[in-house]
Image: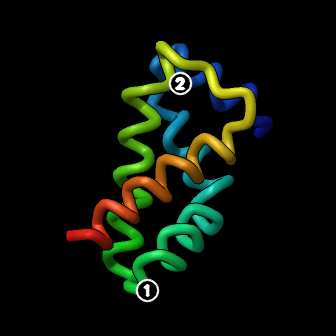
Amino acid sequence: MKDSEIVDLYWDRNEDAIHQTQLKYEAYLSKVAYNILADFEDSKECVNDTYLAAWNSIPPYKPNILSTYLGKITRQLSVDVFRK
């Protein structure tokens, strides 16, 4: 599925958006989180928090490049966990 179609699912508040995001970007987001945290469980939790943050933020904001947008969210969440 194309990124624009996934973003449209978020705009329509279709829960399949999270599933499609997970199918397409879970490996990438897990790698971003793991590179910061070096812990599998914390990385997995940050990726799940990324899906929630995307769900809550995409309707008012429409990202041009979904992978970059999700990666930035994951990186910020991972750094916050690392600092704790």
Residue 4 position, x and y percent, is: 75, 26
Identify the secondary structure beneath mark 2. helix
Instruction: Pick the quarter of the image with the C terminus.
Output: bottom left
Q: Is residue 46 above or below residue 54?
A: below
Q: Residue furthest left?
A: 84
Location of residue 23 in the rendering, given as x and y in whole percent from the top left corner? 62, 55
Q: Give the residue displayed 64% in from the left and 20% down from the top.
A: 8
Q: Nearer the viewer, residue 20 or 39?
A: 39
Mark 2 and mark 1: Cα distance apart in space: 30 Å
Quarter residue 62 falls in: top right
Q: Which mark is residue 4?
A: none
Colour style of the rendered protein structure: rainbow
In this view, 79 is above or below 76:
below
Residue drawn at (54%, 16%) of the image: 11
Are the residues tagged 2 and 1 within 8 Å (C-beta)?
no
Of mark 2 and mark 1, the one earlier in the sequence is 2
- Residue type for callout 2: Tyr
Q: Residues within 10 Å of mark 2 (few under 14, many from 20)?
A: many
Image quarter of the N terminus: top right
Dot 1 alpha-carbon crowd within 10 angstroms: few under 14, some 14 to 19, many 20 or more: few
Q: At x 38% / y 85%, what residue is drawn?
A: 39
- Give the residue at x 59% y 45%: 21
Element type where label 1 sits in the image? loop
Check the image and name the residue furthest to the right. Answer: 2
Task: Between residue 67 and residue 4, name the one nearer to us.
Answer: 67
Mark toward the viewer: 2 or 1: 1
Q: Amino acid at mark 1?
A: Ala
The spot of residue 15 in percent (x, y) is 45, 31
Report the disc number at residue 10: 2
- Which of the labelled discs sits on residue 38, or is there none? 1
79 to the left or right of 65: left
